[in-house]
Image (cartoon, rainbow, N blue to C red):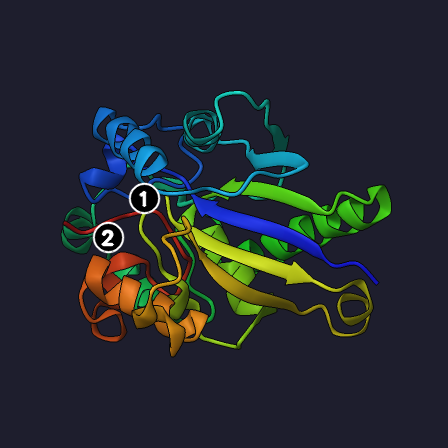
Amino acid sequence: MKSYLIHLIRHGASAGNLQGRYIGKTDSPLAMESVKTLAELKQKYEYPTADAYYCSTHARCRDTLKILYPEETPLGVDGLEECDFGDWEGKTASELQKTDPAFAKWMAGGEQASPPNGEGGAAFMYRVCSAFEKLVEGLIRSHTYTSVLVIPGGVMMTILSAYGLPKAPFYDWMCEPGFGYSLRITPSLWMRGMVAEVYETLPRQGDGPAQADHTVIDLAREAADRAYGKHEEESHEESPQGGPGEASQE
């Protein structure tokens, strides 16, 4: 039975991301620095082509795809938007720590904690997983064997921690903007256990000897450490357990 390949790519950073602000449902456009960075990545590395191109409905996702694939017209996928941070949208962690006592509880990952007037972690995960499963079912029904999907970082980490093999925790799947992972879905395995093999990091940078003895998750962890420092120690700064997000710490 033929397998299905889905290439997940994290969108470029918005101006709010670069300022360390929580940018979830806010439709913040790409920063000018990100436009340049994405163009340089496209010129330097190889991004896979596909039968179909999808993205979250955020403008920053659509614009990222158009930079990397200028000849393609992406289809927006409802449900794959970043977490709704409610009253915390557009604010930094340092600002919230000074003004909102509920923020500390959310940072600690309390089960009942969620951003005021926003989306809790469980609701976010359910929404993302439901949308991704619906997308996969549509790809299988239509025999669309290869696809590209540009999404926010929190959405990508949710998908990979829920379905990816090898299994790894949420924060182990961090990657820099413009980077991502390729999934291989075998219909029989998907129907039985909803699992997807993570077989490659993106963009493709060649198969040099340094990569020969590495698994994809090893590469993912190393990339996260290079981008964010030791992510096990700093994970709360990048995205609190109460709800994964797009705030970035420079």
- The answer to whether residue 27 is left or right of residue 165 is left
Nearest to the observer: residue 230 or residue 130: 230
Answer above or below: position of 98 versus 59.
below
Q: Residue at x 42, y 42 (%)?
A: 46
Q: 209 or 1, which lies in front?
A: 209
Q: Quadrant of residue 219?
A: bottom left
Looking at marks 1 and 2 on the same chain, the residue that comes earlier in the sequence is marked by: 1
Answer whether residue 81 is visible to the viewer in this image. Answer: no
Q: Position of residue 56 (x, y in %)?
A: 54, 37
Crowd band around label 2 with a 10 angstrom C-alpha radius: few (<14), some (14–19), many (20+) = few
For badge 2, the amino acid type reads Asp
Residue that badge 1 annotates: 88
* Residue linked to disc 2: 100
Residue 148, horizontal then vertical, whole percent: 57, 41
Q: Secondary structure at mark 2?
A: loop
Residue 7, image x and y in percent? 55, 49
Q: Name the amino acid type tagged 1.
A: Trp
Q: Looking at the image, can residue 228 be seen?
A: yes
In the displayed structure, does residue 11 sit left or right of residue 93?
right
Pick the front one: 43 or 78:
43
Compared to residue 177, the image places residue 110 above or below, namely below
Report the mark closest to the observer, 1 or 2.
1
- Say the numbered circle drawn on residue 246: none
Residue at image position (21%, 29%) is: 33
Hey, which quadrant is residue 184 in on the image?
bottom right
Residue 49 position within the rendered picture, expressed as x and y whole percent measured from the top left? 57, 38
Which quadrant of the rendered structure holds the N terminus?
bottom right
Label 2 near label 1: C-beta < 8 Å? Answer: yes
